[in-house]
Amino acid sequence: MFHLITTSLIVRCQRVAALPFNLRICSTLSSAENQQTVQALYELSVDIQKVRKFKGWVLHQSPAYAKEVSDLLKDMGASGSIISHILTVHPESVLCHPEQLQAQKELWMTVCPNQKELVGIIEKFPTSFFAPSSHRDNQRQNINYLRSLNLNKRLITKLMASAPQSFSRPTEENKVMVCTLQQAYLDLGGDKANMKIWLQKLLSQNPFALLKPPEDLRQNLLFLRDRGFSSTELLHLISKLKGFIIELNPDSMCQSLAYSQETMGCSEAELRDIILNCPALLYYPEAILAERFAVLLSAGISMSQIMETPTVLELTTQIVNYRIQRLRGHGYDVRTGSLEFLNGTKKNFEMSYGKLQLRRERPHFNPVAPLKGDD
């Protein structure tokens, strides 16, 4: 009996310890569900069974503010279905004090263009909006810092939504990474007048870039310089890779480059040219590259064609097979033609495919054929 009681207390303590700090200080855990919360959520068409299954501990908390949270979202323009969705996927939002939520809303509105867009952000990233109040000072300071760099407000909003960790930490940590990026850009010959645009694109492509250690960027650039890339080429590379240059590491790049060079049978200089056209070869692991080379070669495409248009290696095997079949249906042979028709985004491919359709369907004009006239 003593063992069962002890086990029960341990489990209960673990649940309490798992709660965010700002919720623990104002909520208490009860052995029974808070019927007021359950009823309020039920009236808001929240999937109670789903809440019980994944975050049942929320229903045992007191006090809770389901109606207040709902009213705040409704005042911002959220529909009933959106409110129901938010409270279902992130029920712990009902444990946030209304004053905290109002302060959070005011903070987000300093960078968000309007309440409608903020509702859309909350719907997609509820965890980011219903953040602990203890983070608010850091959030405010990071917003002010990024605005001091003249970065676009929409970009700052995107960063707050998709990478909230970079706003909950001290501003100094973000300053170090931003300064490292800016210095690398200038050291490689980047134009200071274009640095803001370059930084915006980098952070937009990879919102988690600020969370990476600055040393990772330095090591990656040093590795690529040792492989023979000039400063101009390095600037081109990090501009095309954008924030993903920080996701790489020398060991994985070394393996990918060694495999690509051996498979294509090219020289170091040729490999550098190929990488400049298709930087993605730096971060695809050997297994993925092997699969993609195999699919292209099995379709009758030559290695010289791949080397001429290496960006086809950015396409998944499913996309390559699908596009080859569609092109064949219109009489285009990828074995003898340019891979540009196979290449590119979905939009670019559809445009190329449309041109092939027109070429096939357009009647050929015979300049010596007699014209049909009226009898």
Image (spheres, rainbow, N blue to C red):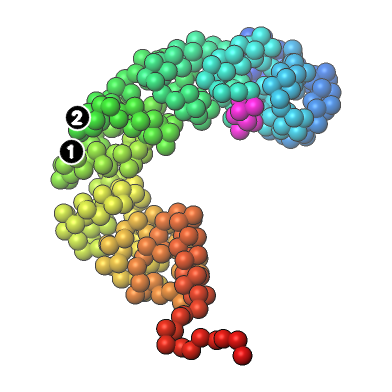
In the displayed structure, would residue 126 be above or below residue 140? below
Q: Quadrant of the N terminus?
A: top right
> Residue 92 versus residue 33: which sits nearer the camera?
92
Indicate the quadrant where residue 122 lies.
Answer: top right
Q: Which residue is mark 1?
A: 231
Horizontal arrangement in the rendering, residue 222 relative to residue 337 (left or right): left
Q: CA distance from mark 1 to mark 2?
A: 8 Å
Q: Where is residue 92 shown, x and y percent of the image?
A: 67, 23
Q: Which residue is mark 2?
A: 187
**Which of the two labelled residues, at mark 1 and mark 2, occupies the earlier sequence position?**
2
Decide if residue 6 is in sight here: no
> Residue 201 versus residue 322: which sits nearer the camera?
201
Let me know if residue 86 is in the magenta part: no
Amino acid under disc 2: Asp
Please identify the dominant SS of the magenta region: helix
In the displayed structure, would residue 35 be above or below residue 340? above
- Residue numbers of the magenta segment: 116-124
- SS of the residue under disc 2: helix
In the displayed structure, would residue 44 be above or below residue 24? below
> Residue 350 versus residue 374: which sits nearer the camera?
374
Number of numbered tags placed on the structure image: 2
Decide if residue 205 is in sight here: yes
Residue at horizontal 28 percent and vertical 32 percent from the top: 217
Q: Are marks 1 and 2 in contact (CB under 8 Å)?
A: yes
Q: Where is residue 157 shown, x and y percent of the image?
A: 51, 25
Let me know if residue 118 is in the magenta part: yes
Horizontal arrangement in the rendering, residue 185 relative to residue 134 (left or right): left
Amino acid under disc 1: Ser
Q: Residues within 10 Å of mark 1 (few under 14, many from 20)?
A: some
